[in-house]
Amino acid sequence: MKTLSQTDPAILELIGKETKRQEEGIELIASENYASKAVMEALGSSLTNKYSEGYVGKRYYGGNQVIDEVESLAIERCKKLFNCEHVNVQPLSGSPANAAVYFATLKPGDKVLGLQLDHGGHLSHGHPVNFSGLLYNFTQYQVDKETGRINMEKVREIALKEKPKMILAGFSAYSRNLEWKKFKEIADEVGAITFADIAHIAGLIAGKAIESPIPYFDIVSSTTHKTLRGPRGAIIMCKEKFAKDIDKSVFPGMQGGPHDHATAARAVAFHEALQPEFQTYAKNVIENAQAMAAELMAAGLKIISDGTDNHLMVVDVTSKGISGKEAERVLDLVGISTSRSTIPFDPRKPMDPSGIRLGTPAITTRGFDAEDSRAVARAITQAIENHSDNKKLESIRESILALCKKRPLYS
Ligand code: DSN
């Protein structure tokens, strides 16, 4: 970054600090990952200079011949990767993508079913403070108290009673596979549109490690920067019959000019995800999560639903005499990044909930294997159990540094 060092050393220094933090820490935030250098090079390219409102061959600005090729390539690769009929690669991020889906298919006040936020859903799945909950009439389904899993019989009961216009399946903190086919059957019974938000698991689906909703669902949205390991951004895939409405809703309905540099970076990420190594990565993400979950449970920590089928787990830390917020802080001290999380039926408040959410996409990209994941789980347990012992925390920090050195990220 020679030029940046001359133009803006202050920002260069901050980038350096953040790079060091990433290099010397263990990233367990389930929605984070490390984009490849190729993705970052595309992001930092001349494509950031262009305006291209519209779609391929139908732009509202001149000079878009190259951008048309970039966007066409991103579309072609995404269709191949997910085997979808249509894709819009312009949404700027996950919530705007979900907003575009609602605008394309619903009227304000229409009824939708979505998973409740503190049971693993997402803000944009109908939370009352979010635009989704403010504009639409969401009924939220939950996980069962006993099993921590979504009970499809209950979802069916709610659907039969509420007769929603749309059924939404997707999550940001749920560690079990969703039963896509059952969701579709229920939706068909009540005549609802099916919408899947696969932001968290898109990379696992692309890597063929878990089942895809695309054969069943009408519309599927995803971010591109989580397990999929691309740039920040999103996509909306759909059956051909929704294509026009989705495209109109993204532009001109929701957005102006797409971020062409990020479209190019999405194309790079799709290309990477089409390589055989990506399937190994996806399989390893799950293996690492299962190894970590088993080790944490063996140490007496409660994992919601007693394990994981994907890249994440929600851990109730209160049995160790600590809250989720305090666990997040202590783990930060030893160099492990996590995010506090509510647990289903949490007696505590969202800002200081009972749990933490852990995920293995980033450490898997970095080359951690199941044994490394177990070592991380042991470090987590030790840090939580010794949260007031600074000496002990310092020695855990040393062991984390050693693990990071063994699996270098950028060097
Ligand atoms: N904020 C993301 C997550 O952490 O799951 C979802 O948008």
Image (cartoon, rainbow, N blue to C red):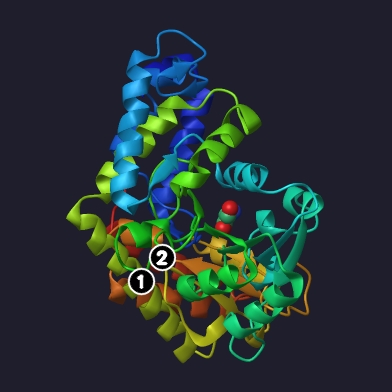
Q: Secondary structure at mark 2?
A: loop
- Image side of residue 162 versus residue 250, left or right: right
Quarter of the image holding residue 249? Answer: top right
Measured as percent of width and height from the top left, residue 51 is found at 50, 16
Mark 2, Cα crowd under 10 Å, few <14 / some 14-19 / many 20+, is many
Identify which amino acid the numbered label 1 is placed on. Ile
Residue pictured at 64% horizontal, 77% vertical: 155
Residue pictured at 37% horizontal, 44% vertical: 35
> As rendered, which of 6 and 227 lies closer to the eye?
227
* 182 to 301, vertically: above or below: above
Q: Which mark is residue 360?
A: 2
Measured as percent of width and height from the top left, residue 319 is found at 64, 87
Measured as percent of width and height from the top left, residue 272 is found at 26, 46
User: Split into 4 quadrants, where in the image is the C terminus?
Assistant: top left
Q: Residue furthest top?
A: 62
The residue that label 1 is drawn on is 286
Whether the residue under disc 1 has CB within 8 Å of ligand 1: no
Whether the residue under disc 2 has CB within 8 Å of ligand 1: no
User: Where is ligand 1, by quadrant?
Assistant: bottom right
* 354 to 110, vertically: above or below: below
- Find out whether the residues at labels 1 and 2 contact each other: C-beta distance under 8 Å: yes
Quarter of the image holding residue 353? Answer: bottom right
Measured as percent of width and height from the top left, residue 279 is found at 25, 61
Q: Secondary structure at mark 1?
A: helix
User: Split into 4 quadrants, where in the image is the N terminus?
Assistant: top left
* 346 to 338, vertically: above or below: below
Residue pictured at 43% horizontal, 15% vertical: 6
The number of callouts visible is 2
